[in-house]
């Protein structure tokens, strides 16, 4: 589920795919701790705006053929992970 003020993001009918740097200088970044189901807040740019700089980075693709039709976006800096409410 995606919430955004950006029409391109909120109108993506099948969802979006966001690439994020999770390994830098041989060390894991905080982005590496993001897991499926986590709620996160991030500012993203279209992948086409970052592709010339980051396309040579090794990417781990999602093992889902349907992911290839999703709009691709990019996030380089730390993703803010929302705290889970442990009272539920």
Image: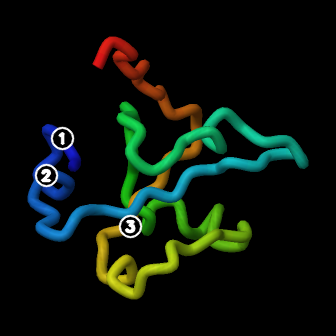
Taking the spot 52% from the left edge, 60% from the top edge, the residue there is 50
Mark count:
3
CB atoms of marks 2 and 1 within 8 Å: yes
- State the mark number for residue 36: none
Picture layout, residue 21 above or below residue 61: above
Q: Which residue is mark 3?
A: 72
Q: Callout 1: helix, strand or loop?
A: loop
Residue 68 horizontal side relative to residue 54, left or right: left
Question: Left of 82 or right of it: where is 10?
Answer: left
Image spot of residue 68 (x, y percent): 39, 82
Across and down, in percent, residue 23 comes to 76, 49
Estimate how packed mark 2 is, as few (under 14), some (14 to 19) or many (20 or more) residues with alpha carbons within 10 Å. Answer: some
Q: Position of residue 43 (x, y in %)?
A: 38, 37
Q: Which residue is mark 1?
A: 3
Discs 3, 2 touching: Cβ within 8 Å: no
- Give the residue at x 63% y 70%: 60
Numbered disc 3: secondary structure: strand
Residue at x 52% of width, y 46% of height: 35
| Towards the viewer: 73 or 64 | 64
How far apart in space, not on screen, are marks 3 and 1 (Cα)? Answer: 16 Å
| Marks 3 and 1 close (CB-CB < 8 Å) | no
To which residue does mark 2 refer?
10
First along the sequence among labels 3 and 1: 1
Measured in 3D between alpha carbons, the distance from the residue under mark 2 to the one under mark 1, in whole angstroms, is 6 Å
Which residue appears at 33% of the width and 83% of the height?
66
Image quadrant where residue 53 sits: bottom right
**Rendered location of residue 67, percent (x, y):** 37, 77
Answer with mark 3 or mark 2, whichever residue precedes in sequence.
Answer: 2
């Amino acid at each position: 589920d995606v919430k955004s003020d950006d029409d391109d993001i909120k109108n993506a009918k099948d969802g979006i795919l966001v690439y994020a740097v999770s390994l830098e200088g041989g060390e894991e970044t905080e982005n590496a701790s993001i897991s499926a189901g986590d709620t996160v807040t991030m500012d993203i740019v279209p992948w086409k705006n970052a592709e010339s700089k980051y396309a040579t980075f090794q990417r781990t693709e999602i093992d889902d053929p349907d992911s290839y039709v999703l709009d691709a976006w990019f996030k380089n800096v730390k993703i803010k992970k929302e705290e889970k409410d442990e009272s539920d």
